[in-house]
Every structure is written in structure tokens, then in C-alpha cells.
Image (cartoon, grey):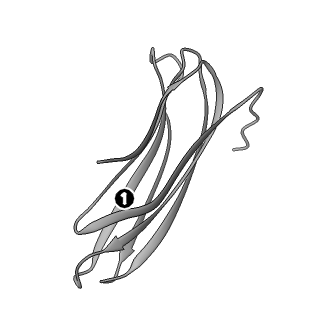
Amino acid sequence: MDVAELTGLPAGMYVAMAKAQFNLQSESPTSVSCTLTLSDAADQGGPFIDRSAASLPGAGTTTLPFSAVGDLPSGGTAVLNCGGNDVVATNVKLTAIQVGSLTIMP
């Protein structure tokens, strides 16, 4: 499910950051996994993706951070998508900052 979305980003280079706290509603252990995606409107420059996952031992919380950088020559969207059983996302933040240039270290 999409937890947060920024649409209508103008053409340019972006640094996107997200975080979400996940609360497990049951006593049974489960896992949560998420994907932060920067997608170009015309599929010219992406998608640029960051993934993260965590296991929750039962009736607990965990916070996951994400970051992605990329060039969106046609503009586009930033989406945080997460999934897990009996897990609720709270305190969600999604930010996309347009920058003049990008240097990506491997």
C-alpha cells in the first residue's frame, strides 16, 4: 500500500528522503518491507529505488529510514510503499528536494 506520495514534481534532479514508524498490532511476530521510489513521468530516468525491511517480534515498533537520488527529466513522483501483516505506519515523512547537481558515491 502507498504510505506517502509526492506527485507533480517538476523536471530536475532530486534527493528524496522518507521515514516511517511501524506499530505491530498483534502479539505474533511479523515483518514489514518498504520501497521508496522516484519515478520519471515519461520513464526516461528511473525508477530510482531504496528498499528496507524489518522483523517485529510482537506488539512492538520499529522505524525505517529511506533515501533515493535521481534525475527526473520529465518530472515525476516520489512514493513510499509498504506492506506487512497487522502493521500500521505512523509518523510518516516524505521529502523530495530539487538540487542543481548530483554526485553519487558507489
Q: Nearer the viewer, residue 64 or 47?
A: 64
In what quadrant of the picture does the C terminus appear?
A: top right
Tell me the residue at 29%/48% (across/down).
1
Tell me the residue at 73%/43% (across/down).
105
Question: Where is residue 36 drawn, in percent x and y?
Answer: 47, 45
Tell me the residue at 27%/80% (across/down).
29
Question: Where is residue 58 drawn, in percent x and y?
Answer: 30, 83
Query: Which residue lies under the disc numbered 1?
Result: 33
Question: Where is residue 7 drawn, in percent x and y?
Answer: 46, 29
Q: Residues within 10 Å of mark 1 (few under 14, many from 20)?
A: some
Tell me the residue at 32%/69% (across/down).
31
Question: Where is residue 80 drawn, in percent x and y?
Answer: 43, 46
**Left or right: where 75 falls relative to 29:** right
Disc 1 residue type (three-letter): Ser
**Left or right: where 103 falls relative to 61:** right
Question: Compared to 14, does 75 lie above or below?
Answer: above
**Left or right: where 32 falls relative to 72:** left
Kindly state the secondary structure of the residue where label 1 is placed: strand
Q: Nearer the viewer, residue 98 or 50?
A: 98
Question: Compared to 24, does 18 lie above or below?
Answer: above
Dividing the picture into quadrants, the one containing residue 96 is top right
Question: How many numbered callouts?
Answer: 1
